[in-house]
Image: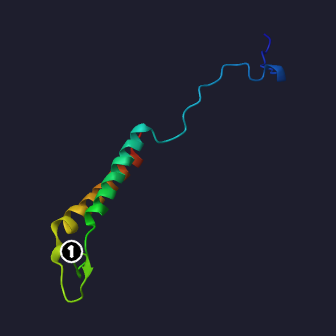
């Protein structure tokens, strides 16, 4: 019984079947879509927080007046909720597998 050996020469190198290359990039198209949705929620939340400060009346600073608009539901509840939802969507987008 003869022992068969696999001997390769330099001219044989690279002539075999090539293994298909796997895409090593982790994020797919769906991940980027969810990231953009999350960024839109975060940006929308920060835009909802915008408005005049406590001492601004009709666009002018007045130290003798008080603007209760800084405590509106939009600025205190809804806008931070949008930001938190946006960050949760970002976490989902990062952890989602292809």
Residue 76 location, quadrant: bottom left
Residue 44, can we see it? Answer: yes
Whether 5 is drawn above or below 92: the answer is: above
Q: Is residue 28 left or right of residue 37?
A: right
Residue shown at 20%/89% (left/top)? 64
Q: Residues within 10 Å of mark 1 (few under 14, many from 20)?
A: some
Q: Is residue 96 above or below residue 82?
A: above
Count the labels in the image: 1
When the figure is inspected, residue 60 is found, relative to residue 51, above or below; the finding is below
- Percent of width and height locating residue 43: 33, 57
Give whichever of 48, 23 is nearer the camera.
48
Dot 1 lies on which element? helix
Quadrant housing residue 86: bottom left
The outermost residue toward the right is 10
Q: On the picture, is 50 further left or further right than 5?
A: left
Q: Which quadrant, please, contains the C terminus?
A: top left
Residue situated in front as seen by the camera: 21 or 39: 39
Residue lying at 28% horizontally and 67% vertically, measured from the top left: 50
Residue at the spot of label 1: 70
Q: Can you give x and y, in whole percent of width and height, for residue 9 in the image?
A: 83, 21
Q: Using residue 43 as the reference point, say whether residue 71 is left or right of it.
A: left
User: Is residue 98 visible to the viewer in this orientation of the structure?
Assistant: no
Q: Residue furthest bottom?
A: 64
Viewer-proximal residue among 51 and 78: 51
Q: Position of residue 4 (x, y in %)?
A: 77, 15
Give the quadrant of the N terminus. Answer: top right
């Amino acid at each position: 019984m003869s022992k068969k050996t696999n001997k390769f020469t330099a001219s044989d190198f690279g002539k075999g079947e090539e293994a298909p290359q796997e895409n090593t990039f982790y994020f797919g198209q769906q991940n980027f879509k969810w990231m953009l949705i999350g960024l839109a929620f975060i940006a929308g939340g920060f835009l909802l927080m915008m408005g005049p400060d406590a001492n601004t009346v009709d666009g002018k600073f007045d130290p003798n007046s008080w603007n209760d608009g800084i405590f509106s539901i939009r600025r205190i509840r809804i806008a931070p909720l949008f930001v938190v939802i946006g960050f949760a969507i970002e976490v989902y987008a990062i952890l989602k597998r292809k």
